[in-house]
Amino acid sequence: MLIDSLIEYRKRKGHDITVVFDGWKTGAAQENQSVTGGIKVIYSRIGEKADFVIKRIISSDRREWIVVTSDRDIVNHAWALGSIPVSAEDFLIAIEKGIPSYLDEKENGEEYIKPQRKGNPRRLSKKEKALRRALSKL
């Protein structure tokens, strides 16, 4: 069902999409890759977690990836390499409705939250700007 949804999304947007599944416990001896409906599907090999494969992919091809994950370790790794991590929840909202409404509230200044950093309190951080830019592409 996930792959079918991503195929439909790819038809609308034309993005290159790679999905990595965990073969840690029941995978094959070698990493398997296939293309289904234009979606690159990777199954990690036995004894290797999908997290490691994702980190390897974004480390080897040093470009700005949009990484959909809710794993904190991958999020930190992606930020460190100049990629933009998007939570699975935000990704679903973005592909169904557009940019999440909570991001719009921050920009419009409707909700004031006392800043815990120096500088302009209404100015978005670099990470927030990158996340907004990534979500606008989805």
Image (cartoon, rainbow, N blue to C red):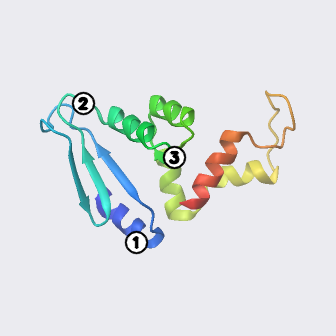
> Residue 63: horizontal and vertical position, in percent?
51, 46
Residue 50, x across and y down, in percent: 31, 36
**Which residue bears the numbered disc 2?**
48
1 displayed left or right of 26: right
Q: 70 above or below 98?
A: above
Q: Which residue is mark 1?
A: 11
Residues packed near mark 1 inside 10 Å, few (<14), some (14 to 19) or many (20 plus): few
Q: Quadrant of the N terminus?
A: bottom left
Return the x and y of residue 137 as percentages of the image width and height. Answer: 57, 60
SS at mark 2? loop
Label 2 is placed on what type of residue?
Glu
Left or right of 37? Residue 134 is right
Q: Nearer the viewer, residue 109 or 134?
A: 134
Q: Which one is in front in this view, the residue at disc 3 or the one at disc 2?
A: 3
Residue at 26% x, 38% y: name it: 22
Query: Which numbered disc flags the more N-terminal residue, 3 or 2?
Result: 2
Which residue is more in the foreground, 138 or 115? 138
Q: Nearer the viewer, mark 3 or mark 1?
A: 3
At x 77%, y 51%, the residue is 107
Q: Are marks 2 and 1 in contact (CB under 8 Å)?
A: no
Q: Nearer the viewer, residue 120 or 64?
A: 64
Q: Secondary structure at mark 3?
A: loop
Which residue appears at 12% of the width and 38% of the height? Answer: 28
> Disc 3 marks which residue?
63
